[in-house]
Image (cartoon, rainbow, N blue to C red):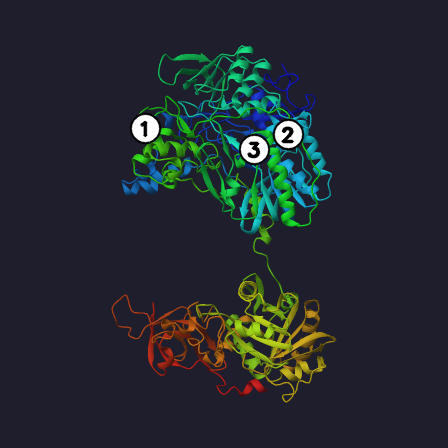
Amino acid sequence: MSAAGANRIAGAGRLTPANTVRFTFDGKSYTGLQGDTLASALIANDVHLVGRSFKYHRPRGILSAGPEEPSALVGVRRDASRHTPNIRATVQEIHDGLDAVSQNRWPSLTFDIGALNDIGSPMFSAGFYYKTFMWPKVAWKHIYEPVIRNAAGLGVAPKEADPDTYAARYVHCDVLVIGGGVAGLTAALSAAESGARVILCDENAHPGGALRFEGEARLDGMAGHDWAVQAAGRLAAMDNVRLLTRTTAFGYYAQNFVGLVERVTDHLPAPEVDMPRERLWQVRAGQVIIAAGAIERHMVFANNDRPGIMLASAARTYLNHYGVAVGSKVGVYTANDSAYGAAFDLKRAGADIPAIVDIRDEPDAGLVEEAGVLGIRVLTGHAVTGAGGKLRVASMSVEPKKGGRTEVIPVDALIMSAGWTPSVHMFSQSRGKVAWDEETGRFLPGTYAQDCASIGACNGTDGLEATVNEALAAGEAAAKAAHPKAKKPSVAISVGSAGKWAGGMVGAGPGAEAGKVVKAFVDFQNDVTAKDIRLAVQEGMHSIEHVKRFTTNGMATDQGKLSNLHGLAIAAEALDKPIPKVGLTTFRPPYTPTTFGSIVNHARGKLFDPVRRTPMHEAEEAAGAVFEDVGQWKRAWYYPRAGEDMHAAVNRECRTVREVAGMFDASTLGKIEVVGPDAAKFLNILYTNPFLKLGVGRLRYGTMCREDGFIYDDGVVGRLAEDRFHVTTTTGGAPRVLHHMEDYLQTEFPDLKVWLTSTSEQWAVIAVQGPKAREIVEPFVDGIDLSNETFPHMSVAEGTVCGVPARVFRMSFTGEAGYEINVPADYGRMVWDAIYERGAPMGMCLYGTETMHVLRAEKGYIIVGQDTDGTVTPHDAGLSWAIGKKKTDFVGIRGLKRSDLVAEGRRQLVGLKVKDGKTVLEEGAQIVDDPKQAIPMKMIGWVSSSYWSENCGAPIAMALVENGHNRMGETLYVPMPDGVIEVEIRGTVFFDEEGGRLHG
């Protein structure tokens, strides 16, 4: 007996016997070999029971040898904070110290009290949750919900924060090959030799695909797996190839954007602290070649879920790759030729094969003959109608499929194959449409939606030689599509012998037909049986999507890789319809379970919502600023002095700006450089205002609408040259306005010669506002004459400030004479300090966003998103003057002409005077015209902005009111919990209505 397990076969497999590894499962220590998966190591130690099923808590074992595994889900932990539930034992590689635990059982795996559910299974048939827990109502909160929540799920979610790090890479390539079997390797070689930049990803530790278990395959005179190792080494040595192993393509998105996740350290006993656990690859490929292979189906019969029952290809993989026999007395149940190869390999390795039960009447004569030579009995036209045993399969019941005597054959393992399902998941994710192939009874790639090709088994290509030829052609074609002048590849592969994979069946086998009360499992993870599928149809679920949701077939973490086609066939039979008429469920990403860590990546903790600070943040902090969060920005809210609360500080700041001057950090405003011969034409289309004739050195306030005519953003646009504009946006609007511009530039006006660059972070902006603003900033400015005559309101010029390059804007958001000084961000703090050092002795103050809000409201300036709500037009906001009267086209012009946007009664922006002269209205408060009307009252508007104005000596407010522009002087009412507040409609400008202060 091997030290690495009683079922380890000497001389079998590809692992090195000397490289032993110690690991634990449910607290018991075992020995495996380096390169083992947890599944292969457990089977080597004769452990088949690894978990309990979700609903019935039935004993479950290892069904497969790959990512399609639905049953062998375990928890894996390195320490208290590194516990990951629902890891597939068939994928997890063992390492020294690996600690794995079974799931969904209590108090132990062998004795699980939850197995009572299996006894009471008639109460838990498909869809039972739609019909139960209805009464008494009080029981839901105190009994049903707590019990259901406690029972939900398979594993235990970790409670500690994830201490691991995750990496991310963006990469472009000419050809992405998904899958490293013979088809993928061949296509990658062909494309790479043509000169294309190639990425080949494969979910296993080593490429090879089915060549890991297929012993008969011969390529270039070598055993198939030896050829795969050589081909992978050849690719890895090429400069234009990136070979990614342990890397799963989990999502295929628009424009050939494919998500890959690489397992970097899960197989290592002691990863370096600076190594990521996983790496997310976000690949943009010119061409995608899908070589995802096919997935073997299980046979549907009574008790087909007993531990020790598994797919034939899995048994063959464990033997030929890992050197492990799945049992000493192995039964075989098949509808496909490939199971014979597994039986033959196991027999030659010393296992007893008491019978091959083939549901087909006339399987391949050569295989039957070879079985006879090996002394294996073949029962054709027979079916396995049940399996005995509890914690492990102990026997199989066999009878002729047309009826007859039942023979019970003792076994300690049972392998099965119902045929192979092409893996069309990635093709389907690409939005391609699959097509039913009547001749072979399977769904295959049909209509393509993206620049991709499917090859090999996932394309329904049968035979090794046909697969190789198809892959060579696909690789060359993909390379030429990326580079029309790509050279012709010299790669040539000779194909020798190969195994036979013909035959198959879908649906329930004999003994699990309609009317039979047995548990013949279709979906192992969600405990869905053939009877459940038929019940769904009986209950009126005639769409496969409805059947899926009623039964949860295919909704587990394996996404029905094994169960979908069986479930579809059973439903089709119950509906008496052909399979394609019933449809196929939608395959969605991720292809296999993907950790939140890999997707979230760096975006967690402080980086989940990164804090942005302006270049002057530290200076503002030193000045005592209280900050508020505006999006991701930290903005100075107000600057309290000793003994001042917020209201006192804001009142002082407001007075100081009007009487002397104030300095404000406006760096967070969005800034976009619009450059090109057609820049003015482009802006003229994007904004409601006219921009074609805006002179160099002049500014213009701009309103931007959506197609529907509603205000999207606003800002000031400055023309620096005939072909260059400096565009400002609201702080929160910077990214969406840039996206809005790019969208129109790329999709609607691609002929315009315009280039857009975000410069929001490049410029620090210092706004100095007030009667003494010019006097304060003028000494620092060179190259710009700041006199009213030369540099009037709404002017812009480039020069230097404090010796550094600057763009100076003569503009104001306070109604006072003002200058917004844009300097490179690295110099923002220096210029800020210099201006403050001069202005402070003259009485200038620093002011924050709250004061800015009050000052702009005193002048009736709107804030998009506060005084607009997505349904406000420029007319509604009192900005009709901002719409070019002679313009024949701009974004939103047709929307503004819609009947409902020009109808009477629209909510329009107005000012509100509070009658008592002291009450500050609450923003968002509703407005009515009759406070005595019955409840619910008719609301005719709401308060959008409201402040105490120290400069006006009264509260001020703006509101959106129905037909507001025509109701000046009317009295309206604001009902509040403490009483009704009377208000009078007035204009929106509360201070300096003539606007003379703007000109200094």
- For the residues labelled 3 and 2, the Cα–Cα distance comes to 12 Å
Q: Residue at point 55% right, 37% down?
A: 84
**Amino acid on which disc 2 is placed:** His
Q: Is residue 170 above or below residue 387?
A: below
How many residues crowd around disc 3 within 10 Å: few (fewer than 14), some, or many (20 or more)? many
Q: Secondary structure at mark 3?
A: strand
126 relative position to 586: left or right: left
Which residue, given by chain and number where applicable, does mark 2 sit on?
95
Q: Are marks 2 and 1 in contact (CB under 8 Å)?
A: no
Q: Is residue 474 above or below residue 330?
A: below
- For the residues labelled 1 and 3, the Cα–Cα distance comes to 34 Å
Which residue, given by chain and number where applicable, does mark 1 sit on?
122
- For the residues labelled 2 and 1, the Cα–Cα distance comes to 43 Å
How many residues crowd around disc 1 within 10 Å: few (fewer than 14), some, or many (20 or more)? few
Precedes in sequence: disc 3 or disc 2? 3
Residue 727 position, x and y percent, is 59, 72
Q: Quadrant of the N terminus?
A: top right
Quadrant in the rendering for residue 549: top left
Q: Indicate which label's residue lies in the foreground, 2 or 1.
A: 1
Q: Indicate which label's residue lies in the foreground, 1 or 3.
A: 1
Residue 181 position, x and y percent, is 61, 33
The numbered dot on residue 286 is none
Q: Residue at point 59% right, 57% down?
A: 610
Which residue, given by chain and number where applicable, does mark 3 sit on?
76
**Amino acid on which disc 1 is placed:** Pro
- Most extreme residue toward the left is 934
Q: Quadrant of the C terminus?
A: bottom right
**Amino acid on which disc 3 is placed:** Val
Residue 801 position, x and y percent, is 71, 77
